[in-house]
């Protein structure tokens, strides 16, 4: 009797499944993929760039950088090495990366842990507990950013946190009073279960009680939600790059995802406080708060929280094109 063994999953299929789980502003998922022989191209989808909140596509490139890291981690966990070229063709600025599959490799325990974390990472917009994030976790998060060439600054001084909170309040006020921003936000806020993109109503957190330090983004249905207390002493981190080019933003997107996945493996949750980096004046002020060392790209609220529901994702096959052999040869 012949015993048949199941075939291992296709590493490329696993990589694409991981790629589409990357975070993105308003869950726009601004990526496309093209497959050739032993290669995966990652492209920016201009139709999914937010024209009001992200007119220069900075946040979209961060998201695509996160997808690139997910691809690399999934390939390594499946036993395939890869080499990445960012912005490989100057004439094609929407071609953000080419990932070449290499020979087999032996994944490390960290590779496997981070690849597993891709499945469980969530943006947690709900209240966190008062449990402080221990020093070893803080160091691990900062190290994760440094591995990818970025800097994670923890706002641990009360004065710095107060300044950040003031910038956050002002930026949220400007966006709340901007009818174009609100219309865009409404277009990407959806009912539960009826779309494969956008932010479902069910994943938003409750309204913070009056006096809460951090001002969270108000979604169109926020006024209908109950008030709840949020953490009194939040941990806020700012992820920055040392230049502000498209290349730096892609690399910082990879760092952002490594930080988020490292936090997931350590059991901490995170949510984005995007308002101050979406308003140019606030972003300049935030850079000044950081001592002009780095360009702020991402602001994160980090802590211990209860499990958050997932946001929907488009299936990989809907965002992937398979190039013909002739196309591959032409390139």
Image (spheres, rainbow, N blue to C red):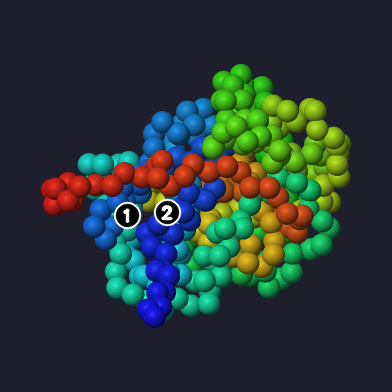
In this rendering, the answer to whether 29 lies above or below 109 is above
Q: Is residue 58 visible?
A: no
Judge from the rendering whether residue 280 lies leftward or rightward of residue 269; answer left or right.
left
Q: Whole-Å distance between the Cαs marked 1 and 2?
A: 9 Å
The residue to which callout 2 is attached is: 16
Of residues 119 and 231, which is closer to you in this image? 119
x 43%, y 70%: residue? 6
Please report whichever mark, 1 or 2, sits nearer to the chain's N-terminal start. 2
Of residues 77 and 55, which is closer to you in this image? 77
x 57%, y 58%: residue? 119
Q: Residues within 10 Å of mark 1 (few under 14, many from 20)?
A: many
The image quadrant of residue 276 is top right
The reply to whether callout 1 and callout 2 are in contact (CB within 8 Å) is yes
Identify the disc placed on residue 40: 1
Identify the disc placed on residue 138: none
x 24%, y 47%: residue? 323
Of residues 217 and 116, which is closer to you in this image? 116
């Amino acid at each position: 009797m012949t015993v048949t063994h199941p075939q291992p999953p296709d590493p490329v299929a696993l990589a694409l499944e991981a790629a589409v789980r990357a975070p993105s502003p308003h869950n726009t998922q601004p990526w496309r993929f093209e497959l050739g022989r032993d290669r995966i191209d990652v492209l920016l989808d201009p139709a999914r760039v937010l024209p009001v909140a992200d007119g220069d596509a900075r946040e979209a490139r961060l998201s695509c950088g996160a997808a690139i890291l997910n691809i690399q981690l999934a390939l390594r966990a499946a036993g395939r090495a890869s080499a990445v070229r960012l912005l490989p063709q100057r004439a094609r600025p929407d071609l953000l990366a080419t990932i070449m599959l290499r020979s087999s490799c032996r994944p490390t325990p960290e590779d496997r842990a981070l690849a597993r974390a891709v499945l469980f990472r969530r943006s947690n917009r709900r209240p966190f507990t008062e449990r402080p994030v221990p020093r070893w976790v803080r160091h691990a998060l900062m190290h994760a950013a440094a591995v990818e060439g970025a800097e994670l600054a923890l706002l641990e001084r009360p004065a710095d946190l107060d300044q950040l909170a003031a910038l956050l309040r002002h930026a949220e006020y400007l966006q709340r009073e901007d009818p174009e921003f609100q219309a865009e936000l409404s277009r990407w806020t959806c009912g539960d279960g009826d779309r494969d993109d956008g932010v479902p109503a069910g994943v938003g957190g409750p309204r913070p009680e009056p006096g809460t330090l951090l001002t969270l983004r108000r979604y169109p249905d926020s006024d209908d939600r109950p008030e709840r207390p949020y953490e009194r002493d939040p941990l806020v981190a700012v992820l920055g790059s040392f230049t502000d080019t498209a290349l730096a933003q892609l690399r910082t997107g990879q760092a952002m995802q490594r930080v988020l996945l490292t936090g997931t493996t350590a059991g901490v949750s995170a949510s984005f406080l995007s308002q101050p980096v979406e308003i140019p004046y606030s972003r300049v002020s935030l850079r000044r708060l950081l001592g002009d060392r780095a360009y702020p790209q991402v602001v994160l609220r980090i802590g211990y929280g209860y499990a958050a529901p997932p946001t929907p994702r488009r299936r990989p096959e809907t965002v992937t094109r398979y190039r013909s052999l002739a196309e591959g040869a032409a390139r």
